[in-house]
Amino acid sequence: MILSDKTIIKMLKDSELKISPLENEQIQPASVDIRLGNTFGVVEDSPAGIITMDSEIKYKTIESDTYILLPNQFVLATTMEYFELPDDLTAFVEGRSSLGRMGLFIQNAGWVDPGFKGEITLELYNANRCAIELKAGRRVGQLVFAKMDAAALNPYKGKYQGQKGATGSRVYLDREIV
């Protein structure tokens, strides 16, 4: 079940759900607006010109209130907000249609697990032929919350728990399932 603004407000008031910082205007009928933070991450070139999933990927971290995203460029970004989800609530990130119409694709893995705590890392891609100016504090999407039928047996405690800033891939930490 998708949460309404009424339920979101109650959960925030009761500290079941935590979002900080949060302005009242960010709460929409069935979501909470997320804003762009001031940390960006760009994959550094590797000597071989290949990124593998078996070794750590190096990122250049940039802290700035403005970032110019060039055509066909990919950059990691972060939300301004820090989230703490209870064990019976999940969420997913949706980009803003207004920005998609400019050619700015906003994605994260799409899913925020119950029990997650941290800022959400966003993957931004400029599909336009013109550069796009990104500004910290700007609404870039929304977080839609869904109540689970029961609390998770194993709430999130993964490699991105507590993340702050544009956090690069940690896929090299994955164990193979055979």
Image (cartoon, grey):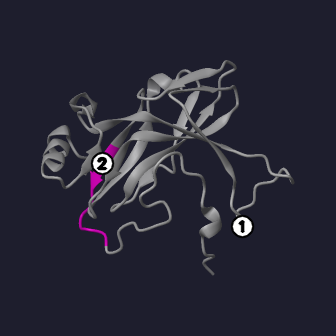
The residues bearing labels 1 and 2 have C-alpha atoms spaced at a distance of: 33 Å
Residue 154 position, x and y percent, is 36, 73
- Most extreme residue toward the top, as rendered? 130
Mark 2: amino acid? Phe
Q: Quadrant of the C terminus?
A: bottom right
Q: Amino acid at mark 1?
A: Asp
Q: Is residue 165 left or right of residue 52?
A: left
Q: Is residue 46 left or right of residue 162?
A: right
Above or below residue 154? Residue 165 is above
Q: Is residue 121 left or right of residue 170?
A: left
| Residue bounds of the magenta highlight | 144-152
Between discs 1 and 2, the one toward the N terminus: 1
Specify the label residue 54 is tagged with.
1
Task: State yes or no: discs 1 and 2 in contact (Cβ < 8 Å).
Answer: no
The outermost residue toward the bottom is 178
Task: Identify the element where label 1 is drawn.
Answer: loop
Residue for badge 2:
145
